Structure formats: structure tokens, C-alpha cells
Amino acid sequence: MTTIKAVRGTRDILPPESAVWNFVEEKVREVFRAYNFQEIRTPVFESTELFARGVGEETDIVAKEMYTWEDRGRAESDKGQSLTLRPEATAGIVRAYIEHNLGERGLNKLYLIGPMFRRERPQKGRYRQFYQIDVEVIGPPSSGSESPARDAEVIEMIATLLDKLRIKGWNLQLNSVGCPDDRARFNEALRKALEPVVAQMCSDCQRRAVTNPLRVFDCKVTADQPIIEKLPRVSQFLDEPCRRHFDELQEILTNVGVDFHINDRLVRGLDYYTRTAFEFTHGALGAQNAILGGGRYDGLSESLGGSPAPGIGFAIGEDRLVMTLQETVGDVVKKPDLYLAPLGAGMNREAAKLARELRRENLVVDLGDEDFRLKKSFEQATRAGAKYILIVGENETKAGAFALKNLETGEQVSVPRGELYRAIRRQEH
Ligand code: HAM
């Protein structure tokens, strides 16, 4: 019979790599707490319309990559509903913000960790189910949500997080994509510039040139790049307030010592962005080198039917972040302090009792089986990477003292039951 494999573009995260994921998420929660962020969890599937309206019909995500299906529920209210596995988190969080009137609380500083789904061509660093660590700062204009101080705070927080994870060699690319008025003028100029050359471009670009010329900058086709290189840049179309906003952000970042590079080709692949847009790339990642991307989305709430709620956020691709940390696996995996080896009939119950006592003292204890021969117990303990092995036999149990063997040094000491916990801890430090 053929075996069943994970679906193309999805994968299992196995130990010991899962320990790196936990390490990342622990650090993330610790750093986000210092900036007063709180966790939000939204559903993994939402109405298709949310993403069509939020992310934009003409984006690659909505046009080509969503996992969408018609709900076949029998209830009248379910019938014919089009549902989609979330390809990103921002639209769902802004929906929740509107639905629960979170604007009444003033400025919301939220984060979400979870799986996202895009039907992209799988390759290294690109999966169909991948994980994002998403952050959003959103609130009514009166909460200061529009201020470049918020943009700077969020970007500085990322730099702090990457430093704490000891990720070196990242590069921050920064741009401003302006406000809707700037974009209208920019799109007009792009349309004009594209007119004489668009026939030489790929079919996607030919469509984009008509529907949403800005999206031409998402094109990955090599032959189109020389044409795209010569197109006007959005930076030439920023009005005074947008320019000032961008300048202020740069000044704060310079002042706090976060390095950045201006990249005026960066427009990001989602339609909701206004003003600030940014990406952090990492040299070790190859073609899919963006560890994270984000920006401001001052009009998103209104396009989803809510009242004005400017916001800024970003999403880290956790799979890619973990890839940059591969070499730390050895440092973050917590190995057992102790392997308990019951020896002889009736010793499972004694060992279970002792394991319970020691685990309650927060030791990491692995437990064998009385059916194992001594040799097998030693093999199991070594494979588990345990620091100590302790034999639980009838004599030891009766005497209330156990031989504690250090598997690294081979040293063995006899320790009374009540002292075990301290003996193991003491050796650790
Ligand atoms: P995004 O640039 O589409 O932005 O995705 C953010 C990050 O998710 C990327 O930089 C990348 O690291 C990771 N990523 C995206 N697609 C894949 C994939 N197929 N496989 C592995 N990793 C992937 C957003 O999603 C926005 N919602 C970010 C945002 C939040 N903007 C404002 N707030």
C-alpha cells in the first residue's frame, strides 16, 4: 500500500527544530510585552470578501493564491458562502477591530502568531502553509495612530527582537508609498510611461497596466526588469504631509540608531499600504530573502466599512526566521536532567513515584521500563541526551539511597532520596 505524505508545500515541524520555534516565540512574547503589546487570535478562515476588499483584487495573493471554497453547510445561512483560509493576518485583525469596537479603547497594540495559507510555487523558504508573527498598531486618529512615532516604535521593536535572537546581517529597506492622492497621480504617470512599452511585457503586467499599474513592481519576470527599472518612482509623487511623515520617521530611526536603506522600488504586494512600507531581508536566505514585511494602512478600516483607524504593522515569516537560526538548535533544546531506569519486577511503580517527586521540583525526567535490561536503559538514556542516569532497583528503594551516575563524566555517587533533587541541581551549576 502506498503511504500518505504531507501535501505539497506543507511540512511537519519536528523536534529538535520545534525547540527553535518555541525559543523564537518565547523571545517574541518577552520583547512584545516590553512594548506593551497584547495577543489577539482570529479565525483561520474568514469570508472571501474580507481579503478581496482588504488585500485587493489585483494582488497576486487574491488573484492567484487563495485557498477558497464554497461552504456546503445545509443551514440557509451557510449556503453559498465563499470562505478562504487566511493568506495574511492584517485584514482579519482589522475586521475584529471594527466588529468589537476596539477603537473605543484608544490605541490597540496587538500581535498574532499562527499559520497562513497561500498557493504559491513551493521552494526553499516558501510554503503553502507558513507561519507569521504579525503585529498591528491601530486606533482612531485621536489615539495618535497616525504619528510617525508609531512607525518608528514598531520598526525599532523589530530591530530589538532580531538583536535579542542574535540574528545578524539583516537589512532594513524603507520607502513611502504615499497617500491615496499621491498614488492616483503616480498610477496615472505609470500608465503613461507603460503605454509605449507594455506590449513587450508579460501578460500579468499587461493586465496590471490597465487595472492597477503600481502592481507592475511586483513582477518577477527577468525580461521585464529593465523596463520596470526605468519607470517613475512613487517617491517623486509624495505630497508635503507624506514627505514630512517619512522624514520624521527617518529622523527618529537615525536617532535611536536603527540603520536603514531607502528603496524607492519597494511598493509591497498588498494594496492596503499607505505611506510607510518596509522589509527586512537577510543574506543567508537565498531567493526568498524577506524575513518580514510591513507598513502603514491608514485607509483599510474604511475600506472594510469601519470608521477611520490608521494603523501600522508587519509580519515576520517565522519559517524564514527559524532558518536563520538553524545553528542554535543545540543551544535551545532542553535535554533531560535525569533518566530513571527501573530494574526488576515491580520497580515501575517505585520509579513512577520517584519521577513524580523529582518532576514536581521542575527537573526534566525521562522514565524507562522495568522490562529493559540495564544495557538498554543506558542506551535509552544516552540517546535522550540525559545528564544523569539513576537505577531504581529493589535494594536502592529499600535503602532509600540511589546510585546517581553522571553520563558525561562517568562519575557515580550514592545519594539519599531526599537529597536527589539538590544533588542534580548542584551539579548543573
Ligand atoms: P507579506 O510581505 O505578504 O506581508 O508577508 C510577510 C512575511 O511573511 C514575508 O516577508 C515572508 O517572510 C513571510 N511569507 C510570506 N509568504 C510566505 C510563504 N509562502 N512561505 C513562507 N513565508 C512567507 C503581510 O502578510 C502583511 N499582512 C504584513 C503586514 C502586517 N503589514 C501590515 N501589517
Image: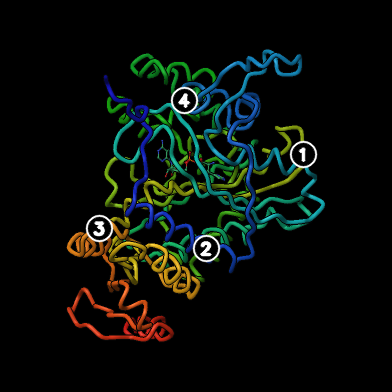
What residue type is disc 4 on? Glu
Q: Are marks 2 and 3 in contact (CB under 8 Å)?
A: no
Q: Residues within 10 Å of mark 4 (few under 14, many from 20)?
A: some
Name the side, left or right, on which 403 lies relative to 90: left
Disc 4, SS:
helix
**Which mark is first along the chain, 4 or 3?**
4
The C terminus lies in quadrant: bottom left
Of the image marks 2 and 4, the number of the one nearer the N terminus: 4
Residue on which disc 2 sits: 157
Residue type for callout 2: Met
Relative to 217, residue 400 above or below = below
Distance from Cα at disc 1 to Cα at disc 2: 28 Å
Residue bearing mark 1 = 99
* Residue 372, disc: 3
Q: Which residue is painted at 70% across and 32% down in the image?
A: 303
Front disc: 1 or 3: 3
Q: CA distance from mark 2 to mark 3?
A: 51 Å
Q: Give the CA distance from mark 3 to mark 4.
A: 52 Å
